[in-house]
Image (cartoon, helix red, strand yellow):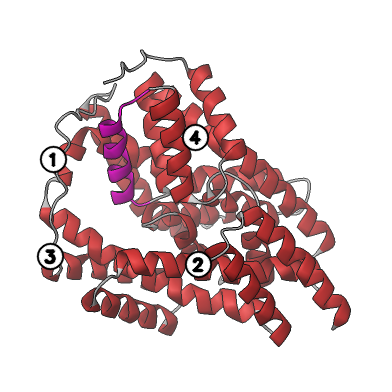
Amino acid sequence: MARMSGPGSVLEVLGVATRLGLTSFGGPVAHLGYFHEEYVVRRRWIDEARYADLVALCQFLPGPASSQVGIAVGILRAGLLGGVAAWLGFTLPSAVALVAFGYALKTIGVEDVGWLHGLKVVAVAVVAQAVWGMARNLTPDRNRVSLAILASLVVLGSRTPATQVLVIVAAGLVGWMFLPATPPASAASSTTHVPRGKGAALVSLALFVALLVGLPIARQVAPSHPLAVFDSFYRTGSLVFGGGHVVLPLLQSEVVTPGWVTNEEFIAGYGAAQAVPGPLFTFAGYLGAVMHQPPNGWMGGVWTLVAIFLPSFLLVIGALPFWESLRGRSSSQAALLGINCAVVGLLLAAFFDPVWTSAITSRADFGLALVAFGMLVFWRVPPWVVVVIAATGGALIAKVV
């Protein structure tokens, strides 16, 4: 076995993560491939078994899986500050781009701009691709398909954040009681050493729960728009299982329903998020910028980014020391199967509303969405290229119509 490299510095982690943040296109699955090539094969910071353990842990936790894997690798490499550096480097490039796009959008608006409508259309293709891939992987049999459809129907019937959370919890209970699961075989050579004790992990988990429970109470006791925004984005980051595109339905209900962001602004930004590298959760930075008038948009973007990513830090720090015992329990795996079914159902509901209803208003829109879907799924065109083509197509459709 190749010898692993020794402990590294925070600046080293920041440099490598920033390069990944500038070049990692393609979504969470692709990100994990880039991480494997960089951290395991090229730099040998961790071995294959340990990397597989980290991926399994972050798939099990709510939040953006690829970002959490990067945070965990940074912690193992250079301690807690290494985890912060890994997150900052991987997140900053796309966050800057999307906050800047939010600034521009507040200036030009979203009405009657053809290329922006093209961004909304490409979101249809992207979410359809996500539903297609996740449904094949996470609902492979009749029971799980039925659970996903039921979850979708419940969410469509009541588009409130509380309903979506209850659906996730209920699906986990159904999975725990009725879905059989075989715990994954533990890699014999994997002993995930974490440079933090269980005491720090317990403090981190306690803080995670305290914020999840306390923020909704605080916003009722002392009403404040910044506090309400932080609570909404923190709760979204705490309850999104599957990461990536699954953040769409929860965020939409949190920011569009209270009127902080319009449906048009939301879908246009989501389409633009496909054109940048790095984690899709940086879409939160765009939303924070759009909620505020310039020159305060960047502060709103930083506020929402901290809120949505904070649960990931707390959960990774809190779960790492306990992962070996947790992953061996079949009940935990069964509950996760049920939660994954709910994830598919939530994404399916979001595909209809707001994505489809906001973007597809004519035959030309449907044709453009169909072409974009074919490019993504069958022709394997890079997402950023599809975004550019769809924006151009939207502009042409606006001129013709």
Name the residue: 43% across, 42% down. Answer: 32
Kind of residue indicated by mark 3: Pro
Q: Would you say residue 159 is visible in this rendering?
A: yes
Label whose residue precedes the other's in the sequence (1 or 3): 3
Indicate the position of residue 114 as horizontal and vertical percent values.
80, 71
CA gap, disc 3 to disc 4?
A: 35 Å
**Most prominent secondary structure in the magenta stretch?**
helix
Foreground of the two, 94 or 202: 94
Toward the right, the furthest residue is: 399
Residue shown at the point (47%, 54%) measured from the top left: 231
- Indicate whether 228 appears above or below 193: below
Marks 1/4: CA–CA distance: 26 Å
In the image, 335 versus 139, the foreground residue is 139
Pointer 3 with pointer 2, Cβ within 8 A: no
- In this view, the residue farthest toward the front is 379
* First-in-chain label (2 vs 1): 2
Q: Residues within 10 Å of mark 3 (few under 14, many from 20)?
A: some
Q: Which residues are magenta?
A: 45-62
What kind of element bears circle 1? helix
Q: Secondary structure at mark 2?
A: helix
Q: Which residue is mark 2?
A: 129
